[in-house]
């Protein structure tokens, strides 16, 4: 699934092709995605794009006719292609642009979404979301306050959108490893110092991944394949049985909240029973 850095990279990659250009029409080949694509998008003719932004893992295309909101789901991707390139089997939505390009949405599993609202923040998907992890409002003090009444494992706590948005499974694993915190530690057992370290490390891990993604922005213009996003330099995620990069102890994994969690039993302390 595309995570926050991949979505941010997507936004940056498509912005030069959309900003201040005109959407001549939107072609919807398959309206049955995660939710039905709203019919109003079919009425977009010669509509100017005023800006692009991101909230959590949602892309927002701000136009003079309202906000178009997209989510890439499990397998979705966007790329910029020439108008004369024929669509393939899973190319479900085309944004035909005035510059001779098409912003093309491909999604084999159809778990993504395209929505519309006069103002994106009015959509229900944006209700009750926590702060962006790269914003100043996301801090160690904030994490500590949020964690006091939560007994859930810290791994799930960091992935809870009401706490903070966009810290997906990969980056939660990497962050906890760098902070020497076991993924099963109850959130309410975090110390203030650990919360400051977590907030600082989450920002660093995400910013590094976004920087890595910046080197592949040209992929959004290549018609011969999906962007695929970027090769992530991961320390522990997906590396069960491999030596820990810090102490060489074999990496282990367990399932928390139906998601694989990878950790080093030597570097990351096993949580003790609550008092």
Image (cartoon, rainbow, N blue to C red):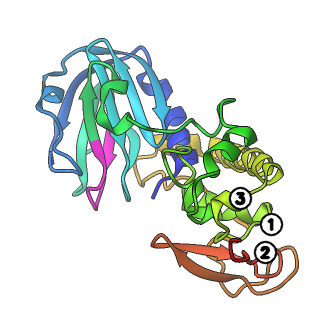
Where is residue 120? Give x, y as percent: 35, 25
C-alpha gap between disc 1 and disc 2: 7 Å
C-alpha gap between disc 2 and disc 3: 14 Å
Q: Is residue 232 left or right of residue 34?
A: right
Residue drawn at point x = 66 percent, y = 30 percent: 137
Q: Is residue 172 magenta?
A: no
Q: Quadrant of the N terminus?
A: bottom left
Q: Nearer the viewer, residue 19 or 118?
A: 118
Of callouts 2 and 3, the N-terminal one = 3
Of callouts 1 and 2, the N-terminal one = 1
Q: Examine the rendered structure and indicate whether residue 151 appears above or below residue 97.
A: below
> Circle 1 sits on which residue?
180
> Circle 2 sits on which residue?
269
Where is residue 127? Give x, y as percent: 38, 35
| Secondary element at image label 3 | helix
Where is residue 106? Give x, y as percent: 31, 51
Of callouts 1 and 3, the N-terminal one = 3
> Circle 3 sits on which residue?
175
Res 260 label: none
Which quadrant holds residue 264? bottom right
Asked whether the beta carbons under mark 1 and mark 2 sit within 8 Å of each other, the answer is yes
């Amino acid at each position: 699934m595309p995570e926050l850095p991949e979505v941010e990279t997507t936004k940056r990659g498509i912005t030069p092709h959309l900003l201040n250009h005109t959407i001549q029409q939107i072609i919807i080949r398959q309206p049955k995605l995660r939710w039905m694509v709203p019919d109003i998008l079919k009425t977009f003719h010669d509509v100017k794009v005023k800006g692009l932004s991101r909230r959590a893992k949602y892309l927002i295309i701000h136009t003079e006719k309202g906000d178009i909101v997209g989510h890439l789901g499990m397998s979705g991707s966007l790329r910029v292609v020439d108008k004369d390139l024929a669509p393939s089997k899973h190319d479900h939505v085309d944004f035909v642009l005035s510059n001779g390009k098409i912003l093309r949405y491909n999604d084999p599993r159809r778990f993504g979404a395209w929505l519309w609202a006069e103002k994106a923040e009015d959509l229900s998907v944006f209700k009750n979301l926590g702060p962006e992890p790269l914003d100043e409002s996301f801090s160690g003090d904030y994490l500590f306050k949020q964690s006091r009444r939560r007994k859930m494992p810290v791994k799930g706590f960091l992935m809870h959108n009401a706490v903070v948005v966009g810290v997906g499974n990969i980056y939660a694993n990497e962050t906890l490893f760098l902070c020497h915190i076991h993924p099963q530690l109850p959130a309410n057992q975090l110390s203030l110092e650990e919360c400051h370290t977590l907030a600082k490390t989450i920002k660093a891990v995400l910013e590094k991944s976004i920087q890595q993604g910046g080197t592949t922005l040209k992929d959004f213009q290549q018609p011969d394949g999906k962007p695929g996003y970027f090769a992530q330099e991961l320390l522990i995620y997906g590396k069960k049985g491999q030596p820990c990069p810090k102490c060489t102890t074999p990496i282990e994994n367990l399932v928390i909240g139906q998601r694989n969690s990878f950790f080093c039993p030597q570097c990351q302390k096993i949580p003790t029973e609550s008092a």
